[in-house]
């Protein structure tokens, strides 16, 4: 293993704490929540108490006030135990928390960020609609300012809202000036206990089944003007900036899945016997394990690099789109490939629910899809390299 000398004592401490919590508290229950699809509220509360739900949030807003690398490290360890828990951590830290940190007012941070960072409340992020995924400029939802100028009235349907069924607050993106396309999108803060909002269908997902995902319907939902996040018509910029941070989180999640599948495969190769010897003695298995190791370590380096670039960008006021997309692309592709190889190495047991290998396989696939598909990442990377659009 590489030494990763750039990790500080603080990084190693939170890594050890996250690893112990994940292995002691999450691993024993992961299979149950994957099977039932229930939301693991108890362990989520505990993660909040440990500071995992607001890792980069300043202490004045009840966060842990650590850096992006600490966030990636925690995401890797939590996701290694269970990707569903990793998704929940990712949404609250990246998609929900970052938007408020970067674009929210001080009052918004005190009201909507601090309780989520503590783990007392849960946040969600809502960009996608039934007919609008990567192309957010085609969204159909609308927020119209009332005649008194005090509220926006929101109507429409949002889909694939992770944490949606259990969220207290939602950062929602909707059209305020639809004739302007992407330049007509605005971000708002939603409180889910107000009239005009209802939970639609809960998605029956292939993987990350314990992370609740649903449609949300808005019917004349009134949003106070002070709940606008950022500026009018600047929601697309807010969303894309948040996604840069979110992609590092998903890269770390994918890395955790890949590492879990790889380590399980090494252990199995040392134990399982066939034709009078350990299967790890067969050259084809050795090749698989060697390639898995290289891919996992490559993904870790790219993910940690992206996190470090994110920290630099925070100081310099620059973007880190390229390293974030590269890390997300590599780690997600690695997670799917390593999980597939792990199933093959385990044979019939890899296909059985008696072992977590098939869960790693199912969970890995989503990392190639959300926060921008692998195809979108390749497009983003190419555009950043060439400057051509």
Image (tube, rainbow, N blue to C red):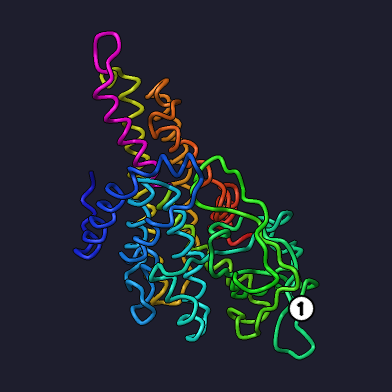
Q: Position of residue 145 (x, y in %)?
A: 75, 82
Q: Is residue 118 left or right of residue 98?
A: left
Query: Residue placed at 76% from the left, 91% from the top?
Result: 148
Q: Is residue 39 above or below residue 99?
A: above
Q: Residues within 10 Å of mark 1 (few under 14, many from 20)?
A: some
Q: Which residue is mark 1?
A: 144
Q: Position of residue 380 (x, y in %)?
A: 57, 56
Question: What predominant SS class does the magenta segment belong to?
Answer: helix
In the image, the segment drawn in magenta is 254-278
Q: Is residue 382 above or below residue 1?
A: below
Q: Is residue 259 above or below residue 128?
A: above
**Residue 86 counted in the magenta span:** no
Return the residue nearer the eye: 28 or 319: 28
Q: Secondary structure at mark 1?
A: strand
Q: Is residue 15 left or right of residue 71?
A: left
The image quarter in which residue 186 lies: bottom right
User: Image quadrant for the C terminus?
Assistant: bottom right
Return the residue nearer the eye: 120 or 253: 120
């Amino acid at each position: 293993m590489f030494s990763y000398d750039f990790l500080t004592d603080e990084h190693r401490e939170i890594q050890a704490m996250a690893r112990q919590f994940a292995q002691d508290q999450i691993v024993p229950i992961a299979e149950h929540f994957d099977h039932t699809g229930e939301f693991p509220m108890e362990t989520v509360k505990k993660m909040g108490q440990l500071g995992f739900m607001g890792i980069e949030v300043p202490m004045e807003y009840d966060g842990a006030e650590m850096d992006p690398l600490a966030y990636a490290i925690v995401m890797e360890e939590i996701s290694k135990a269970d990707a569903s828990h990793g998704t929940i951590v990712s949404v609250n830290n990246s998609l929900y928390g970052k938007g408020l940190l970067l674009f929210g007012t001080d009052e918004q941070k005190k009201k909507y960020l601090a309780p989520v960072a503590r783990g007392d409340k849960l946040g969600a992020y809502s960009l996608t609609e039934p007919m609008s995924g990567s192309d957010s400029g085609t969204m159909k939802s609308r927020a119209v300012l009332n005649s008194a100028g005090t509220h926006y009235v929101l109507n429409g349907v949002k889909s694939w809202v992770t944490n949606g069924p259990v969220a207290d607050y939602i950062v929602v993106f909707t059209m305020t000036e639809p004739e302007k396309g992407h330049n007509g999108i605005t971000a708002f803060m939603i409180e889910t206990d107000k009239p005009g909002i209802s939970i639609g269908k809960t998605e029956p997902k292939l993987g990350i089944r314990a992370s609740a995902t649903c449609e949300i319907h808005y019917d004349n939902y009134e949003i106070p003007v002070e709940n606008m996040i950022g500026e009018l018509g600047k929601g697309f910029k807010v969303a894309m900036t948040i996604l840069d941070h979110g992609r590092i989180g998903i890269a770390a999640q994918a890395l955790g899945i890949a590492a879990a599948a790889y380590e399980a495969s090494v252990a199995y190769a040392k134990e399982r016997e066939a034709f009078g010897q350990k299967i790890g003695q067969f050259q084809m298995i050795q090749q698989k394990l060697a390639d898995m190791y290289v891919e996992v370590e490559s993904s870790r380096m790219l993910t940690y690099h992206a996190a470090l670039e994110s920290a630099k960008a925070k100081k310099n006021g620059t973007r880190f789109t390229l390293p974030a997309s590269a890390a997300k692309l590599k780690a997600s592709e690695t997670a799917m490939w390593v999980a597939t190889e792990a199933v093959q190495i385990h044979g019939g047991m890899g296909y059985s629910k008696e072992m977590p290998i098939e869960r790693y396989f199912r969970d890995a696939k989503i990392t190639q899809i959300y926060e921008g598909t692998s195809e979108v990442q390749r497009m983003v990377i190419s555009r950043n390299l060439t400057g051509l659009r």
